[in-house]
Amino acid sequence: MRAGDATRAEVCVVACAEAWRGDGAILASPMGLIPGLGARLARLTFAPDLLLSDGEACLLAPDEHTIEGWLPFRSVFTVVAAGRRHAMMGAAQLDRYGNQNISCIGDWARPRAQLLGVRGAPGNTVNHPVSYWVPRHTPRVFVDAVDMVCGIGYDRAAGGAGRFHDLRVVVTNLAVLDFATPDHAMRLRSVHPGVTVADVVAATGFPLAAADQVPATRLPTPAELRLIRGRLDPGGLREKELA
Amino acid sequence: MSADDVAAELRPGMTIGIGGWGSRRKPMALVRAILRSGLTDLTVVSYGGPDVGLLVAAGRVRRVVCGFVTLDSIPLEPHFRLGRQAGAIELTELDEGMLHWGLLAAAHRLPFLPIRAGLGSDVARVNPDLRTVRSPYPDGEELIAMPALRLDAALIHLNRADAAGNGQYLGPDPYFDDLFCQAADRAFLSCERVVDTAALLAAGPLQSLLVSRAMVDGVVEAPGGAHFTSCVPDYGRDEAFQAEYAASAASPQAWERFRSCYLSGDEAAYQEAARRFADRAVAGT
């Protein structure tokens, strides 16, 4: 098996996994199928200390079937407040400083489209590391200003709100982005194989910082591909999330 | 008491807290009793699921206090969406943790509790009455002062209870059902089975006794009372029926069909109609 055979979805799984590299024994909370595969891949390879839940109240040991702990929602809130968590959330809208909207589209008082609500995004972003996963990178998602700030971006992370604020990466179907610029504006970190910088710029509704030479997102290793295809997602659901 | 007796204890305009989480262990039999009653103008505090959606669809809700409304396997609650998009309901939109803190403050009879969640976000913009508080200690940190969410009544559904109101959950997560009861002036518990007190500890460990009779004002035996939400280990979510419910938001006609088919009779009629739906689904017709 050659790593060059990896599909875009598999590149995304590995890019998501990389978000949790070096996090240690904290709760990884992936939202979405590909982030979920990424978190599991990270734990099976380079981030073995991560904690992962079954989506309900059980923490599953690294063998993925032994229950190693109990984590009801009331305890999740304490883990959030304690900062012992790195969530990868979705985003209906994101702006250049990482303000995220999952609540509603249009005027909040009477939205054109009611979505989930703010959920835990306000608390997550002021308490612990947060990354985002966007399966369809378009100017409708990457907007100049979001309609309702749920997860807060770097421009709002002043004072107490900034004490534990730590946005890490945004993984999309096209690229990996981060906030490693002087004013924490979003920056193109890498483009997935087969994607050009121009493709990403055209799909982004605000000016995107980028170096002269943007590297390619790394390919999965043969061992990672074997885990993704043979163990984590033998049914190939990952491809549908990008379809 | 019966579910209808519970509804009769409630009044229009009340603030009602509803236990469970999303489409999980919701006191749906009690919600259906509210639908049969004349109650309107309610403020509903909930980790929202189809409890909120049904009450909104039936026009019983003035305001929803929540961080989300979801059917879990169907991420967006369709009737809540319609209500919001039509401007038919008011909304107090809070971070999930702020909702927890508001209930905890109410349970502890505190005016507010400080919390970091909400700082910098538009939760402050859409809740103009929300205030911050500065730590009186040397750190001087500014935090959100989450006001107590005091409830007129709480409604929860558990797996087992005794007739006095000692209630037991047997699934993986207690959610916040005990806190809803403690934040409320009056709390009503429905359960799958009312059993002798001694039978409670035969069914689960000491820690599964979530609420005590001191926290509960009325007990209703309601088998299938969380349907179509999950009530593990007694039953999981009825996904096929939930999809039928979600489809009822497609048009006023679809809602009227759903209402007349499932919500026009008493709880026994609902359970019978749900059984017939399941039989049809199995038969593939």
Image: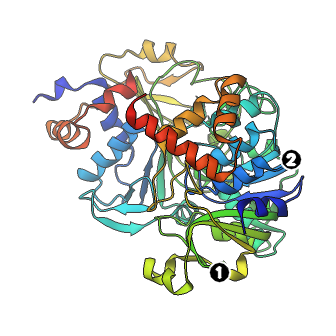
Q: How many badges with numbers are in the image? A: 2
Query: Is B50 in front, or is B261?
Result: B261
* Amino acid bearing label 1: Ser
Vertical side of B66 occupied by A196: above or below: above
Query: Is B14 in front, or is A171?
Result: B14
Point out residue A6 in the picture as x, y percentages from the top left corner: 22, 26
- Which residue is disc 2 drawn over? B40
- Measure how far apart labels 2 and 1 are at the Cα level: 30 Å
At 48% from the left and 69% from the top, the residue drawn is B170
Q: Which quadrant of the figure contains the N terminus of chain B?
A: bottom right
Point out residue A43 in the picture as x, y percentages from the top left corner: 29, 53
Residue B76 appears in which quarter of the rendering? top right
Is disc 1 surrounded by few (<14), some (14 to 19) or many (20+) residues within 10 Å? Answer: some
At 74% from the left and 60% from the top, the residue drawn is B143
B17 sits left or right of B225 in the view: right
B6 sits left or right of B244 in the view: right
Point out residue A190 in the picture as x, y percentages from the top left corner: 38, 27
B231 sits left or right of A118 in the view: left
* Amino acid bearing label 2: Thr
Task: Specify whether disc 2 shares its chain with disc 1.
Answer: yes
Q: How is the rendered protein coloured?
A: rainbow
- Which residue is disc 1 drawn over? B212
At 56% from the left and 51% from the top, the residue drawn is B227
Is disc 2 surrounded by few (<14), some (14 to 19) or many (20+) residues within 10 Å? Answer: some
Q: Which quadrant of the figure contains the C terminus of chain B?
A: top left
Residue A193 appears in which quarter of the rendering? top left
| Mark 2 element type | loop
A70 sits left or right of B118 in the view: left
Q: Name the mark on residue B137.
A: none
Residue B176 appears in which quarter of the rendering? bottom right
